[in-house]
Amino acid sequence: MAAALRILLLTHSFNGLAQRLFAELGADGHAVSVEFDIADSVTEEAVALFAPDVIVAPFLKRAVPETIWRRHLTLIVHPGIVGDRGPSALDWAIQEGEAAWGVTVLQAEAEMDAGPVWASRAFPLRAASKADVYRNETTAGALAAVREALARVPEWRAGRWQPRPLVQTPDVRGRLRPLMRQADRALDWARMDSAAILARIRAADGFPGVADALFEQPCQLFDAHPGRRPAGFEHAAPGAVLARRDGALLRATVDGAVWIGHVRRADSPHPFKLPATLVFAAEAATLPELPATLMAPAGADRAELGYRELAYRETDNGALGVLSFDFYNGAMSTAQCRRLLAAIGFARSRPTRVLVLDGGAGFWSNGIHLNTIEAAASPADESSANIEAIDDVCLALIGLTDRLTIAALRGNAGAGGCFLALACDRVWAREGVVMNPHYKNMGNLFGSEYWTYLLPRRVGEEAARAIMHNRLPLLARQAAAQGLIDDCFGADRAHFAAEVRARAHALAGDPGLAALIADKARRRAADEAERPLAAYRAAELAMMRRNFYGFDPSYHVARYHFVLKSPQSWTPRHLARHRELGWRAPAASAPVA
């Protein structure tokens, strides 16, 4: 581990990469503070207050001011291979089908992305969306490269090591590429095959989407998945919209079809991403529904199942069931919660003794769906309906007293999604997963999902209060150490999935399983006798009604700015430790040579 340093994270927003670095570097023993990149003067003030040994910039949308990088060591995390330059690194790599990609940590200089290289990591590039690759391989590579760079800071200051100048040589295949514009992303439905269309939409996923049209209305496309033409549509013209499923629209291509899950409509009063069938509700209502069968063949993996939000499968002996759910960005609307509740009801009807809840790869769950709430005729009413629906899901899981349930967190979890996981008997998370088990960052929401029951029974009342007050990201291994979850393992998604299978199979075959299930039922009955779950829910919802309908509009204001991606106007004080009252910076370190 590198010597302890004062590190200022300078970032456009506190995105997943910034959260991971904040939590990991703090756990490494560094003193870490955060400043949002709002204006040069604000950044200069933050640097003067904190006097950092090094500034790390994990996510910026503009250049670091010269007044900063000339006097202070500033390391930029660039989501591209060595030599790659420009603001659309991952976009170009995904759209052009690169087999491998990487992340580079380089020193800020006058020319963007052209400074000397401190560290880099390479990884195979999956056929996946930009957001998915960024959350997983890019984030893991960035953490490793940043740690390597920080370990070199003392050697660099002592003159015993120098970063590698960025010089184009035969072994450096990265190059300067411009900002990818919509003209570069344009879709030609009459000529492009499904793979080309998927690559372009995936390269724009998250932001900015691909400018196109549906039902002759301009919009941006997001969240694309492979599809197949249903019977009767073999001769449909490429570009034609064929069917709908779980909020998505199926669109014909020259060699098949693709599902479009989310769109942003240019002329909508709600200029943010929403499920495609919600944005084009009237048009979608005229299309045939193409439902996915919930029950999947034993041993089928997600890729074989095709596009679907929910899938259930069992082992051949019927002892173990796996219920998979994957909601875009981890957000769970009222309708999605109801579909998941029905799927849990189906799983309950099966003769399994162990049930694994397998959430999304990017996010296990982030709780209620703020975008669909913002788009509702009454956001307060929709907030209430959504929280009731997700509470029903939690209640169904808590009530599965005839089997053991396992929450397998492949991806990050936030707010109500954390407590949805805690509704299961066992919670296992992949190494590198970040949890945000609190609500206050969304306008001081009180929260529901039975957290007032689920959290204290795991960690105790005092620790529960501390977790909810902390408002900071929590690494999976830290959550396991605190007793919030049961275990953390698996260096990557493949290893985690394999270990979950092995552990779940072992649990399903354990001779003592019946005793474990009986003990679970006894404890649930005792808890219910002491205080019914209905009482916890009523108390939580009474507080939530204040958030939704009360005099304090903080939740509605915070949700609006979150959904609209409003520019940051200040850095929250729980992140900017250098702005705490009474903060005094230690003696400033030497300026950059």
Image (cartoon, rainbow, N blue to C red):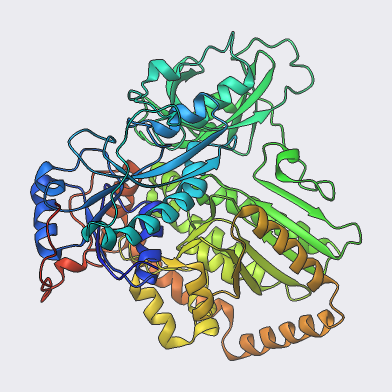
In the depicted view, which residue is nearer to us: 377 or 174? 174
Question: From what the image shows, is residue 460 above or below residue 263?
Answer: below
How far across and how far down the image is residue 256, in percent? Answer: 70, 19
* Residue 503 lies in quadrant: bottom right
Q: In this view, does 500 lie to the left or right of 13?
A: right
Q: Work out whether residue 369 can be spotted.
A: no
Q: Work out whether residue 110 can be spotted.
A: yes
Q: Which residue lies furthest to the front in this view?
A: 160
- The residue located at (51%, 68%) in the rendering is 476
Question: From what the image shows, is residue 527 above or below residue 577?
Answer: below
* Residue 126 lies in quadrant: top right
How far across and how far down the image is residue 69, in percent? Answer: 16, 47
- The residue located at (37%, 29%) in the rendering is 268
Q: In which quarter of the image is the N terminus?
A: bottom left
Question: From what the image shows, is residue 65 above or below residue 449?
Answer: above
Q: Is residue 327 left or right of residue 59?
A: right
In the depicted view, which residue is nearer to us: 414 or 4? 4
- The residue located at (68%, 68%) in the rendering is 406
Q: In this view, does 450 lie to the left or right of 522?
A: left
Q: Which residue lies furthest to the right in this view?
A: 317
Q: How many labels does the image show?
A: 0
How far across and how far down the image is residue 485, in percent? Answer: 56, 74
In the depicted view, which residue is nearer to us: 199 or 542? 199
How far across and how far down the image is residue 73, in percent? Answer: 20, 53
